[in-house]
Image: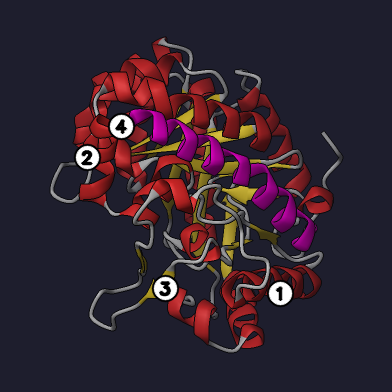
Amino acid sequence: MKPPAPLEFKPDLVEAARRWEAFYAGEIIDRPVVWVTAPRPGMTAPPPSTYHDRVFGDPEAVIENALRCAEATYYGGEAMPVFYPGFGPDEIAVFCGAELMWDEHSGNTNWSRPFVDDWATALPLRIREDNPYYQRALELYRRAAARMAGKMLLAPLDLHTNMDLLLAIRGGERLCLDLVDQPEMIDRAMESARALFPQLWRAFAEAGRMDERGYCQQLYSMEGAANLQCDFSYMIGPEMFRRWVLPALEEEASIVKHALYHWDGPGALVHADDLIASRGLHTLSYVPGEGRGTHLDYIELLQRVQRGGKAVHVWGSPDQVKQLHRHLRPEKTLYCTWAASPEEADDLLAWFVKHT
């Protein structure tokens, strides 16, 4: 790994990087990796920018907002000051030519209008280099890299790639029918979608100068780190997952180096065995979903993941992560939490050292 340099908003970055590297190696220094943030005394962070701000607002104002938020935040343990420049869940589909859809009543999200009526004429998929959203995204990364140098890190795109990309450009009902009616065409579509991933990864890593400064999106590394996902896996069984999704995820993981899998919802638990046995996915981040409890309700699942060799990403209040620590292997757990003050954050870190 390239040696990291301290950041204005993370002066202990070098020490934190040592713990991240131990985590990737399945080792531990004196406690698990803990991402804990707290407000700095006497400072008030502004509301963070939204997807709408990033797509339609003044880029300089968006970047200034991120800097002010980071300045007002204490990044304890392995927490990193990071800016998420992404345009939303379906940004990759939009870069491929889909229409960006927005509704003021839909909250902080967006989506795309499916445009594929016939796979035979739509393939191969390609990034439209002249797409105004694609060019705006690249420019936001370039500006952020310039303004944030020496202060904070950038995160990769919101990587709804592989079959999530097919979902966005085809639509859920038609894609589900295609999996049964024309699986060979889906083979071609997935091959085309997978070819876009390294192109996107390189383009935005270069624009954001992330190869020089490191990456951060839940995980941190100088070599590369990102969240991968396939929310559409909720809609398919293990056989289809193994045919189309798992090979794509493993390929993406080989490119990003350190991969966290965003494992969304109880319907996706059917893929537990395949995810645990997968190559390249370092950390599994199970999201129970609204009204489905906290990670304390899934200790057996988390332990099963760790027995299979994967790390887990868990979050909750300081009291909740302390309870989880009694049941989980410290070298294979990434804890995310918050504190009321920098002192309380440091006390929590000291507690983990004492009880590890």
Contact (Cβ within 8 Å) of mark 3 with mark 4: no
Q: Which residues are magenta?
A: 183-209
Q: Name the amino acid, label 4.
A: Gln
Vertical relation: 166 (above or below) 52: above
Vertical relation: 159 (above or below) 113: above
Q: Is residue 296 visible?
A: no
314 relative to 234 in the view: left or right: right
> Which residue is the site of mark 2?
177
Lower position in the chain sequence, tag 3 or tag 1: 3
Q: Residues within 10 Å of mark 2 (few under 14, many from 20)?
A: few
Q: Secondary structure at mark 4?
A: helix
Lower position in the chain sequence, tag 3 or tag 4: 3
Q: Nearer the viewer, mark 2 or mark 4?
A: 2
Q: Nearer the viewer, mark 2 or mark 1?
A: 2
Point out the residue furthest to the left here.
291
Q: Residue at x 56, y 63 (%)?
A: 84
Q: Residue at x 77, y 75 (%)?
A: 147
Contact (Cβ within 8 Å) of mark 3 with mark 1: no
> Which residue is the site of mark 3?
100
Q: Residue 149 lies in magenta, yes or no?
A: no
C-alpha gap between disc 2 and disc 1: 38 Å
Q: Secondary structure at mark 1?
A: helix
189 relative to 17 in the view: left or right: left
Viewer-nearest residue: 250 or 283: 250
Disc ID at residue 139: 1
310 relative to 30 in the view: left or right: left
> Which residue is the site of mark 4?
323
C-alpha gap between disc 4 and disc 1: 44 Å
Q: Secondary structure at mark 3?
A: strand
